[in-house]
Amino acid sequence: MLKKRLNQCLDLILPPACILCDAACKSTINLCQACIADLPYIKQACKTCGLPLSNANLTCGACLINPPIYDRLVTPFYYQHPLNFIVTAIKFHNKLNYAKILGLLLADAVRQRVFNLPEIIIPIPMHRERLKERGYNQALEIARPISRLLDIPIDYQSCARLKSTSPQTGLKTKQRRQNIKNAFHIRRDFTAKHVALVDDVVTTGSTITELCKVLKSYGVKHIQIWGCARTVLT
Ligand SMILES: [Zn+2]
Ligand SMILES: [Zn+2]
């Protein structure tokens, strides 16, 4: 509480600065309007999997032939500068306040694109060893402002990560799937039927697919994936 008051007082004396260009910004998001406008938005994407498409918002061929296990994936940005800078700062340089920025941007994208909101938000869980190392789960920190803005509770206790999987980057798709198999556990009393999974970056989706499988086996009917940024494999 004291820290919050102190920050509010500091904001009055020193207006909040944009984390990218240092310009003073009035918004609560700590990004100036020019930097927000310059973000690498995915303007047109598949309505189901969020894959960037060159024409109007349709469903991509891959989703038509083989629909994914989830209902909808929303990722507003490409994982490029400055998203990679922001995510790295959150994960490895303790810039926890940057997670709020990503959460606010993601909430805004969800508000514009999603009309059937879920019952709960589940941040992609982190293994307790890694949680101990880092001290926080960035997915949970990103989920907090989304929960507040959209008025949807966060459930970070029903779902646990059992395996401390090696980092997914640098692995081929098949290896990623193998790496993540049986990595999640859901509490027996889990009852939600419509959930949104929140993560910072969506890559090939093998982590997400595995978690979706487990959730479906617990009777979840509808799953949305909300990620801040996506890597696009070419
Ligand atoms: Zn700026
Ligand atoms: Zn698609």
Image (cartoon, helix red, strand yellow):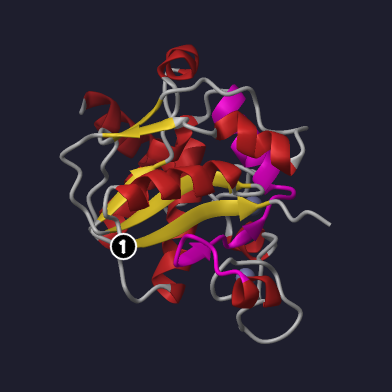
Residue 229 lies in the magenta stretch:
no
> Quarter-wise, where is residue 119 in the image?
bottom left
Residue 30 location in percent, x, y? 51, 48
Q: Which residue is mark 1?
A: 221
Q: Quadrant of the N terminus?
A: top left
Q: Quadrant of the C terminus?
A: bottom right
Q: Quick one: 49 or 14, which is closer to the camera?
A: 49
Q: Name the kind of residue labelled 1 in the image.
A: Lys
Left or right: residue 150 versus residue 61 is left
> Quarter-wise, where is residue 118 in the image?
bottom left
Residue 65 location in percent, x, y? 64, 75
> In percent of the image, x 44 and y 74: which residue is there?
112
Left or right: residue 49 versus residue 226 is right
> In percent of the image, x 61 and y 52: which residue is there?
229
Q: Quick one: 196 or 218, which is closer to the camera?
A: 218
Region rendered in magenta: 66-92
